[in-house]
Image: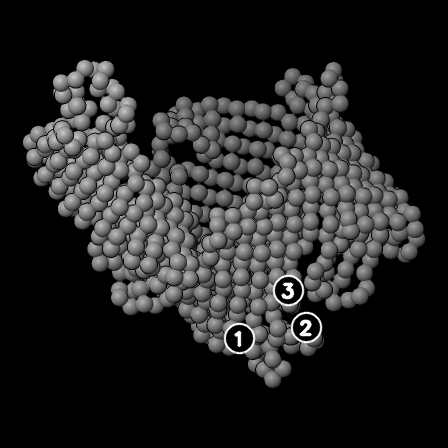
């Protein structure tokens, strides 16, 4: 085998070094290594011809082929037979190609591009190597087989390696069967969701249904989704989501969805009340069949210290989100419509809030507007450790009652200022403080005008830090610990709020600022933190913080021990975690709240258990299991059990089958009313995220279900 290096090849010609440099500067030739079974240089034509196991190399690019003609003066290689161009961003295969090593421009025939997770084939193609490929009469897929299970075919496809894929008039084919048409397709590689989502299922409320989501892409700054849904019992739903992003004007998100609900027609009211018995007796004017939602979110930071946020939520009725977007409803059952501007200064901030009720079936407080100025905790004097913080607000308030024309309104000025002192006596940290609540109301609940309320407060906090290091080595749940540090922080806090000059029963209750009454208590808290260390990492091994509150001279109850609170976090390994918190009422001798959250995750198994207890309300356990039954089959389930009623609130079971480049999910969901929902979802492995609202996962006991 012979090897030629173009630079040294030209040096071998009988010219002076100065003349060689001149030739290169004139011709802009670049040093390409040419290797093959037969390599020859045609000096007159300034070409290198190679045959048999040809390899061309330049920087990070390696080219393999059967035959190659490299034109030195043009930096262009004509490649034939089993062409393979390799770089860090992928591989290009072709029958023949024309490649410019200087500009990286490439023209290809019978091409295959492999830039995982994207694979593409076409009759011909062109582009700039590693930057952009345009395939003519071809397809793309995430299936790496020579005969892929599915393809997206189009007349022209543009691939930006490692970034995105764009095509128009795309046909999705399963095998050779065309199943769906997309007018426009754009897929960002980092975006883990596929542009098209189709889900099928059956439920008691919807009957059989088909939910589709198609993601459209106008540009990186303008994109969204189109929703086209069919419900056997409810009708056809259509919606649009639009997201925009601008460097100069911030980000916005618009959502709209509408359906002519067949179940809400007057002739279907009996069936409606059979499905939703709690809605019987609702006025017919609140049961219109034209059901919809309109939502708008906006966020903008025009300067580094100014932020503007806005939300608008308009629904046809209070049950719409619960009926069609239940997971969103769970997270935010009563969204507020508002605009908030916040201006930050070095030691303070100024905010303006405008909040207006958009849905008459909600009870809300309107701020039209509310201006608030916050002074952050800061040192008053450079000599003495005095600190001050303050909150001052002026608001025009209106309390709107649901489905009623009656409301409460008042103008309110409110301030809360605190002066504190921080010092240390030997090992003891001492932090006494004085404060005052001052509030003006234009009127009270009796109609009396110009009401002034004052309530001074005082308190002190005492604390210290103790620690001890244990050098004893041990192992727990397979995790080795070589050193353990125990940090103890006992904290004693006394709080006193003087009885306000005006009782809260005489004041409209707009928000928490109005709910002010006498309070005196002592709280003892003991923070315990164990920090573990081994040869590979350092972490918080255990955190345990119990606290006890003693209330003094409370009206009608006297002095008594009130709450014992506990917070526990246990992280013995990276695979196993335990979180728990509780609130015990000493007077009633019963737990008010208790939450436990246990998680374990391994390569083949994932297990989660949670319990949420709220006295006189609920006692629920949740259980979630993911198990890899075989290399191709996975089982997942989610259970939620209510002990007070003795039944399951929800059961969900999912079987996932690995179909090489797809995952097929077959799921069943059963609720507490024995309503059964069955669904079938196909997820592309490379882009597995599917935004359909019924797929449930475990979120932990500390969050509401």
Residue nearest the observer in this picture, 617 or 136? 136
> In the image, what residue occupies the spot 22% across and 58% down?
147
Distance of label 1 from label 2 (alpha carbons): 17 Å
- Please identify the quadrant where the C terminus is shown: bottom right
Residue nearest the observer in this picture, 591 or 5? 5
Q: Is residue 57 left or right of residue 332?
A: left
Find the residue positioned furthest to the front: 44
Q: Position of residue 72 (x, y in %)?
A: 21, 31
* Residue 322 in view of the camera: no
Q: Which mark is residue 286?
A: 2
Q: Is residue 159 left or right of residue 240?
A: left
Which of the 4 quarters of the picture holds residue 383? top right
Residue nearest the observer in this picture, 591 or 575? 575
Q: Are marks 1 and 2 in contact (CB under 8 Å)?
A: no
Sequence-earlier tag: 1 or 3: 1
Q: Position of residue 610 (x, y in %)?
A: 48, 52
Q: Position of residue 94 (x, y in %)?
A: 21, 48
Q: Which mark is residue 305?
A: none
Which residue bears the numbered disc 1?
A: 234
Q: Secondary structure at mark 1?
A: loop
Residue 515 vertical placement versus 656 (above, below): above
Which of the 4 quarters of the picture holds residue 387? top right
């Amino acid at each position: 085998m012979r090897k030629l290096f173009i630079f040294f090849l030209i040096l071998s010609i009988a010219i002076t070094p100065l003349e060689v440099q001149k030739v290169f500067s004139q011709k802009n030739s670049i040093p390409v290594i040419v290797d093959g079974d037969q390599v020859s240089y045609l000096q007159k034509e300034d070409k290198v011809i190679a045959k048999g196991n040809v390899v061309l190399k330049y920087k990070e690019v390696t080219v393999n082929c059967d035959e190659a003609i490299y034109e030195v003066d043009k930096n262009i290689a004509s490649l034939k037979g089993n062409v393979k161009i390799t770089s860090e961003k992928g591989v290009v295969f072709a029958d023949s190609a024309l490649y410019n090593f200087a500009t990286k421009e490439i023209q290809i025939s019978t091409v295959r591009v492999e830039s995982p997770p994207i694979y593409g084939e076409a009759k011909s193609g062109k582009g700039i190597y590693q930057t952009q490929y345009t395939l003519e009469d071809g397809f793309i897929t995430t299936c790496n087989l020579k005969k892929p299970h599915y393809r997206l075919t189009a007349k022209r496809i543009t691939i930006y390696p490692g970034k995105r894929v764009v095509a128009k008039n795309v046909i999705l084919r399963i095998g050779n069967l065309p199943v769906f048409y997309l007018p426009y397709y754009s897929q960002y590689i980092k975006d883990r969701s596929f542009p098209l989502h189709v889900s099928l299922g059956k439920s008691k409320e919807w009957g059989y249904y088909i939910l589709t989501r198609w993601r459209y892409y106008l540009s990186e700054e303008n994109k969204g989704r189109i929703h086209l849904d069919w419900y056997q019992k409810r009708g056809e739903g259509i919606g649009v989501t639009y997201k925009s992003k601008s460097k100069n004007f911030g980000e916005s998100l618009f959502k709209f969805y509408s359906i002519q609900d067949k179940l809400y027609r007057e002739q279907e009211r009996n069936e409606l009340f059979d499905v939703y018995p709690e809605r019987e007796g609702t006025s017919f004017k609140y049961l219109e069949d034209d059901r919809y939602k309109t939502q708008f979110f906006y966020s903008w930071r025009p300067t580094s210290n100014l932020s503007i946020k806005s939300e608008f939520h308009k629904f046809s009725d209070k049950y719409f989100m619960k009926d069609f977007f239940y997971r969103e409803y769970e997270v935010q059952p009563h969204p507020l419509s508002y605009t908030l501007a916040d201006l930050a200064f070095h030691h303070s901030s100024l905010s303006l809030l405008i909040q207006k009720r958009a849905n008459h079936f909600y009870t809300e407080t309107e701020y039209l507007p509310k201006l608030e100025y916050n002074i952050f905790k800061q040192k008053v004097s450079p000599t003495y450790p005095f600190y001050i913080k303050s909150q001052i607000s002026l608001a025009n308030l209106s309390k709107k009652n649901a489905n009623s024309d009656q409301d409460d309104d008042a103008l309110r000025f409110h301030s809360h200022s605190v002066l504190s002192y921080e010092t240390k006596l030997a090992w003891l940290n001492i932090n006494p403080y004085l404060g005052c609540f001052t509030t003006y109301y234009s009127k009270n609940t009796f109609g009396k005008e110009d009401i002034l309320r004052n309530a001074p407060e005082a308190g002190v906090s005492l604390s210290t830090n103790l620690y001890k290091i244990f050098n004893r080595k041990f192992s727990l749940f397979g995790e080795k610990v070589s050193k353990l540090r125990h940090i103890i922080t006992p904290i004693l806090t006394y709080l006193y709020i003087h009885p306000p000059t005006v009782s809260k029963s005489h004041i409209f209750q707009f928000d928490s600022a109005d709910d002010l009454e006498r309070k005196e208590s002592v709280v003892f808290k003991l923070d315990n933190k164990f920090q573990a260390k081994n040869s590979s990492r350092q972490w918080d091994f255990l955190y345990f913080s119990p606290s006890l509150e003693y209330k003094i001279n409370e009206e009608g109850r006297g002095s008594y021990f009130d709450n014992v609170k506990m917070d526990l976090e246990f992280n013995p390994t990276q695979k196993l975690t335990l979180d728990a918190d509780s609130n015990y009422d000493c007077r009633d001798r019963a737990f008010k709240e208790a939450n436990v959250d246990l998680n374990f995750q391994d390569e083949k198994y994932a297990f989660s258990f949670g319990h949420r207890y709220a006295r006189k309300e609920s006692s629920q356990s949740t259980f979630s299991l993911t198990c890899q039954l075989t290399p191709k089959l996975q089982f997942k389930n989610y259970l939620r059990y209510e002990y007070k009623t003795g039944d399951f609130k929800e059961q969900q079971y999912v079987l996932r089958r690995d179909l090489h480049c797809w995952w097929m999910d077959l799921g069943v969901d059963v609720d507490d009313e024995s309503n059964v929902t069955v669904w079938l979802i196909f997820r592309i492995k490379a882009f597995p995220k599917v935004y359909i609202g019924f797929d449930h996962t475990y979120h932990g006991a500390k969050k509401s279900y």
